[in-house]
Amino acid sequence: MELALKVLTVFTAISFSIAPAHAAAKVKKKKSKAATQQQPVTSKSPSEELATFLGTHLDRLLSPFDTGKSERDRDTDIKVLKAPVATRAEVTKLDQQFRANASAATPADQPVFQHAVATTTRLTQLMDERERQASLFINSRTTRPLSGLAATNTKKQRKDARQEIHETKNFMSAGLEQQWLQTATRYRQQINAQMDLLRSAERQAKPATPAP
């Protein structure tokens, strides 16, 4: 009987000593899980963010001017041909983000953000150039020459003058269309080259994986 009591006493003591340890381990596990859940999701790399933007907007920014011969009103031309305000705002946001990251980056990461900023700068230059050339193109399609109709008297002269104006506008706009296509090709090459430099900088900044 005494032996049984001793065994029961020892078993009870062990149970009470294990319970707090088990409870503490359970609490620690919950805290660790909660901390893991609260960790921020890994953000995209600069090249991934820019690739997403380029995949959505680059073709639109490099698209040719209207090759049709019908004349639209000036406001419609501006809306169709110039870079959308929202697209420009998105580039500005990315540029500010990369510049802020560059100011806080380690020396190893500095080249990454420098190339990212160089890419957003090139995109801004592309939009500025598109707007400049689009304005010239719109003017070539919508501005009436000062000479021509005012100097005509007969119906045939007015018809010939209108035809001359139409041909002159088409000739000017065709030249501006071709000029923009050459500009767009150059910018596409420059942006692709800048993205290659960015990805290369990211690979060099990434810590090497130790051999097993």
Image (cartoon, rainbow, N blue to C red):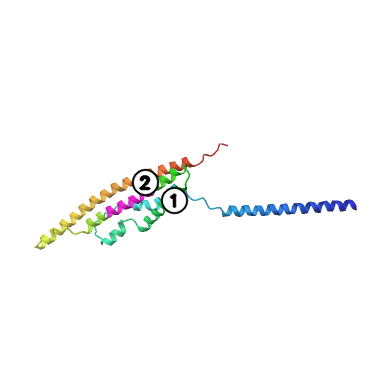
Outermost residue to the left: 153
- Label disc, if present, on residue 85 of the rendered structure: none
Using residue 163 as the reference point, say whether residue 132 is left or right of it: right
| 3D distance between C-alphas at marks 1 and 2 | 21 Å
Which residue in the protein does label 1 denote? 100
Q: Main secondary structure of the magenta part?
A: helix
* Image quadrant where residue 12 sits: bottom right
In the image, residue 76 lies at what x, y percent? Answer: 29, 61
Left or right of 9: which side holds 190? left
Q: Is residue 175 magenta?
A: no
Q: Position of residue 117 (x, y in %)?
A: 40, 48
Amino acid type indicated by mark 1: Ala
Mark closest to the chain's N terminus, 1 or 2:
1
Q: Look at 38% across and 58% down and name the residue there.
A: 86
Q: Amino acid at mark 2?
A: Ile
Q: Which residues are magenta?
A: 120-134
Give whichever of 137, 128 is nearer the camera: 128
Q: Quadrant of the C terminus?
A: top right
**Hey, which residue is sitting farthest front in the picture?**
103
Query: Mark 2 packing: few (<14 Cα in 10 Å), some, or many (20+)?
Result: many
How many numbered marks appear?
A: 2
Could you classify mark 1 by the number of other residues whose Cα lies within 10 Å: few (under 14), some (14-19), or many (20 or more)? few
Q: Residue at point 47% right, 48% down? A: 104
Question: In the figure, is residue 172 to the left or right of 56?
Answer: left
In the image, 16 versus 70, the foreground residue is 16
Mark 2 lies on a secondary structure that is helix
Residue 153 lies left or right of residue 32; in this view the side is left
For the point 37% across and 51% down, the residue is 58
Mark 1 falls on what kind of element? Answer: helix
Q: Which mark is residue 191?
A: 2
131 magenta-colored: yes
